[in-house]
Amino acid sequence: MPEYIKQNVQWFPGHMAKTRRLIKESLALVDGVVELVDARIPYSSRNPELDSIIKNKPRIVLLNKCDVANKTATSIWIKHFKEHGAYALAVDCKTGKGLNRFEEAVKTVLKDVIERNESKGMANKPLRLMVVGIPNTGKSSFINRMGKNAKAKVADKAGVTRQNQWFVVGNGIELLDTPGVLWPKFDDPEVGDKLAFIGSVKDEITDKETLACRLLETLAKTKPEAITERYKIEVDESMQGWEILEEIGRKRGFLIKGGEIDYERASVIVADEFRAGRLGRITLELP
C-alpha cells in the first residue's frame, strides 16, 4: 500500500455560516444553552466559537455516548467542566442513560431565572434552552428521548438538521434544536482527525483508508490492546497505520482478485467498529 499523505480536514459548508447567525439571533429567545459533546473527544468535539457566541448564558454540557467512552476519563472531564463553571452530565442519548438527571440540572443551572420569573408572577413560564453542538453529537436523539413524542430528524451521519426547530418536552421545558455547526478551520490537524474518527466530518470528504490508518496509529500509541483484542493481531506504536490495516484485512479474509488485501473494506470495518464501541470504551483525549 503506498504511503498516504497527511492532509488537514477542512469542512465549512455555507449552511454552517448561516447556522452561526441563527444561533446568535436566537440567543435572546432562550434562558440557557445545552451543549452536546462526544464523550470520547470532549475537547475536539466542542466548537471553540461557541464561547464567544453564547457568552454568559447558563450552560449544561452533555457528554454523550458515554457508554463507548472510558468511564474514568469521563469522570475527569465532568470535574474539569465543573471547575470551569459548566454543569456537566454523562449521558447516552440513544438509550436515555443519565438523562433522568437533566431536569434537575436545568433547575439548578437556571435557578436565578426561575426565581426571577416567580418574582414577576410568571412561575409557570417555560424554561427555554437552545441545543447546540457540532454534527453527529446526538442533538436530535437527545430531543427525541427527552420529548418522547417530539420528533426531530435523526441520522448517524453529519449534516441532517438544517434549520431551527422548537420542541416542547414537558415539565415546563422547551428545547430549540439547531443544525450542527463546525468552525471555519481546524488549526490543529489532530482535532480534524478525531472529528473524522467519530463521524462528525462527512465520510464522503475524507479518504476511508487514510482515516482508518490514522485511527489505527492513534490507537496503537494510546490503547494497542484494543486492536489486539478485537482483531487478534499484535501491534506496537512503531507500526504504521497501513501495516496494521493490512494485518486486519488478512486476518478477516478481506481479499480481492489476485489475493490482494481489500483495504477499502477493512477501512470501513475499522471505522464502523470504533464508532460502535466494539473496540472497547475508548477516550482519545483528557483535559
Image (spheres, grey):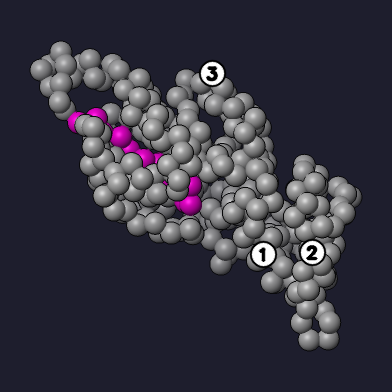
- Disc 3 residue type (three-letter): Glu
Q: Which residue is label 3 attached to?
A: 83
Residue at 51% of width from left, 36% of height from top? 63
Can you give x and y, in whole percent of width and height, for residue 258 in the image?
83, 86
Q: Would you say the residues marked 1 and 2 are in contact, meaning their CB atoms lie under 8 Å apart?
A: yes
Look at discs 3 and 1 and give the one toward the viewer.
Answer: 1
On the question of residue 282 being in view, the answer is yes
Quadrant occupied by the C terminus = top right
Q: Quadrant of residue 33?
A: top left
The boundaries of the magenta stretch are 126-139
On the question of residue 84 being in view, the answer is no
- Disc 1 residue type (three-letter): Ile
Q: Quadrant of residue 171?
A: top left
Q: Which residue is label 1 attached to?
A: 269
Q: Which residue is label 2 attached to?
A: 248
User: Secondary structure beneath disc 1?
Assistant: helix
Can you give x and y, in whole percent of width and height, for residue 72 in the image?
65, 30
